[in-house]
Structures are given as structure tokens and as C-alpha cells.
Amino acid sequence: MKLDLLIPLLIVAVAIPAAALTAEAVSNTPSDGLANIESFSSISDQEVRSAAYFTELGKVLTSPRCLNCHPAGDRPRQGDMARLHQPPVERGADGFGLPALRCPICHQAANFGTVPGNPIWHLAPREMSWEGKTLREICAQIKDPARNGNRSLETLVEHIGDDHLVGWAWAPGPGRQSAPGTQKQAGALVDAWVRTGAACPKP
Amino acid sequence: MTSLTVTINGRVHGPRDVRDDLTMNDFLREYLGMTGTKFGCGAAQCLSCAIIIDNPDGTSYTSPTCIVPAASFNGKSVRTVESHAKDGELTPLQKAFIVHFAFQCGYCTAGFLNESQVLLERLARTPIARADLEKTIAEALDGHLCRCTGYVKYHEAVREVILADPTRYLRSS
């Protein structure tokens, strides 16, 4: 190989990993992770920092693990592709399915094979639908007691940080991608967001 | 392993140690040889594997067996397709399925039969108005898949059984 061809190739070989490292530093966290609270300390404006906490939390809220059971319609979705649930189950009056096919009939107290499980497996109420909404819209909705299960902001911290059903998102069993980060990290983000005024991301 | 004791068609089975990952479908078919309960999609989408679970209060419901652990049936009382005919005599529901040519390959029949039986028992406890009958049957059988497309015939068969005994299943008004 001629020297004048070899040198550009070497430059490219070195430059590609360097570019990847730069991108990694900008995003700060891998796509399947969550940034720690400390990493936001450089944002001096509290409102901006608060919105940044929520934006990071949005990685969890908009993951298939959460969106699939916060659907826009009456049918849940399933899988990482968020396809409509099969068999064709529906929300029902209480969110636990229609009388002929209740959620807990198939969804046991724990994951079984590829079937997800939790003792209270059910759909989020219709007013808590997130599917198809922007993060800003979800932020406004999650602060509204009429659309968040009548929760105060403080209770939201517990709900996302400690709730067992929410925690399933980080232990979804085989064949499903876990929600980003950990439930503890998500809870810490909600806590930090609330403590800084619960600001929503700008449009 | 979990110790399993389950009443199937009135007969107690167990206690017996079963693997925690054993499905009820495998328990019925492979351990007990009760192959009337079918294994279809393996994902609770066709419900050919559905059996009846009897609650202590006299109510009942169906459950798929292909994705449900056998251990979760511990202490329960269930009925399979083998429970319907008595001494070789078919039930009115089974006879209606035949008269209406409801099934062709028959793979879905056990599930449809169990679901229809649960419906009949529910209506016997809580009769409905005639005007609600079609919707009620459709909702009850919803979710059961028939690759031979016998849906209408199953529906008609169930309707015939109900209309043959209106004082039992339908409100007078």
C-alpha cells in the first residue's frame, strides 16, 4: 500500500473512536442508563435544572415498560415494539380487564416464562394516558391530581421510586428491555425535580 | 419445586411436587394424560387451552393454561373438557355444537365449550333480557380463535341452548 493512502486511513481509524468518545461525553449517560443527580449540578438556573431532571426522567416515562400500560386507548400494548396486546384484551371498568378476560388470569404474581407478572397487574387509568404525548405534556399531566391518580408531588416520588408495580419496569423478565437506569435513580430524579419546583421542559 | 394439590373434574390430584416453571397445560396433558385440553398458540392468544376454574362461592371463570404455572392452581377446583359428558351422554351444549357444525378440525372446541358452559352457568344465576343475548354471547366468546372460522356457528349453537330454556337463562321482561 502506498504511504500517501496509508496515512489517511490511519487518521480515519483514530478519528472514529475519538468522535464516539466525544459523543459519549456529551450525552453523559448511555441510552439504557440514567444520569445521577450530581451530574446536573453545573446547571445553575434552578428552573432549568428542574426541567432537566424531568427530561432525564422522561427516558423512563416514555420507555415501552411504562407507555405500554399507559396507552392512549383502551387496549394495552406489549413488547419493546409496543404492538397492541394479544389476545385483544381491553381496559374494562376498573383497569383490570373485561369480565371474561381479567388481567390476573394470565398475569400471575410474578413473571412466568415470558409472561410478565405482578400481584396487581393492570392498566393505568384512562386519564393517566401518556402514549403519543410530548414530555412537556406528560409533565403537566403528571403534576395534575385530576390526571395523576390524585397524587401530591411528594406521593409521586414514592410512586415512581418505591411502587412495586412500577418497579417491574426494571425487572421485566426475558425478551423485554428494562427501563433505563434503576428505580432508585428514577425516584431520586423525581425527588430532585419536585424539590426544585417541578418545572416542565420548554416546548 | 412446589407441592400441588388440585381438584380436576371433581377428583383430587396430589399432593405432587411440580417444577415452578411447569405450565398447567403440560401438567394436564403430559403428567395426567388429559389431552382434551389443547395446546395452541402457547401465548394465551387463541384460548384453545382454556379450562374452567370454580370459585368457592359457586361462580366460575375460564383461564388459559398454556402460560399459567401449574403451581398457581394449588388448592383450586377446575373443570376440563372431559367434565362435560356424563356416562357418554353429551350435554345440550355439546349436542348443539354438533348440530350446528360449529367445529371442523375441533382444535378450538374445548376452549369454546368451557367458555360457553361458564356463560350458561352465569346466566342461570343471573338471567339477562332477551335483547342483550346476542351481545352477551359475543362478549363471552370473544378472544377464542377458530382457524376454521366457526364463530357464527358456535354463536348460534350457544344461542339455541339458551333459547331452548328461556325461563332458566332469560329474564321475563
Image (spheres, grey):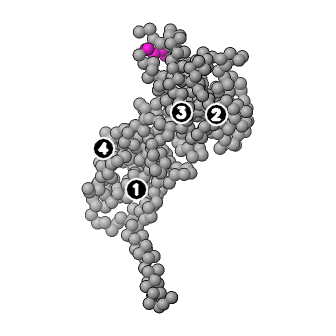
- The numbered mark at residue A59 is 1
Residue toward you, B162 or A46: B162
Q: Secondary structure at mark 4?
A: loop
Q: Secondary structure at mark 3?
A: loop
Mark 2 — residue? Answer: B38
Instruction: Answer whether labels 1 and 4 touch (C-beta < 8 Å).
Output: no
Is A94 part of what is drawn in magenta?
A: no
Mostly what secondary structure, the magenta segment? Answer: loop
Q: Residue at x 47, y 25 (%)?
A: B138
Q: Quadrant of residue B80?
A: top right
Span of residues in magenta: B125-130
Chain under disc 2: B
Q: CA distance from mark 2 to mark 1?
A: 42 Å
Percent position of residue A135, x then y: 33, 52
Mark 3 — residue? Answer: B145
Q: Residue at x 31, y 45 (%)?
A: A141
- The numbered mark at residue A144 is 4
Instruction: Sort mark 4 into few (<14), some (14-19) or many (20+) by Cα contacts within 10 Å.
Output: some
Give the amino acid at mark 2. Answer: Lys
Percent position of residue A54, x then y: 34, 56
Closer to us: mark 4 or mark 2?
2
Q: Secondary structure at mark 2?
A: loop
Please tell me which of labels 3 and 2 falls first in the chain. 2
Percent position of residue B149, x then y: 53, 30
- From the viewer's perspective, is residue B103 above or below residue A59? above
Q: CA distance from mark 4 to mark 2?
A: 48 Å
Residue toward you, B59 or A184: B59
- From the viewer's perspective, is residue B167 above or below residue A40? above
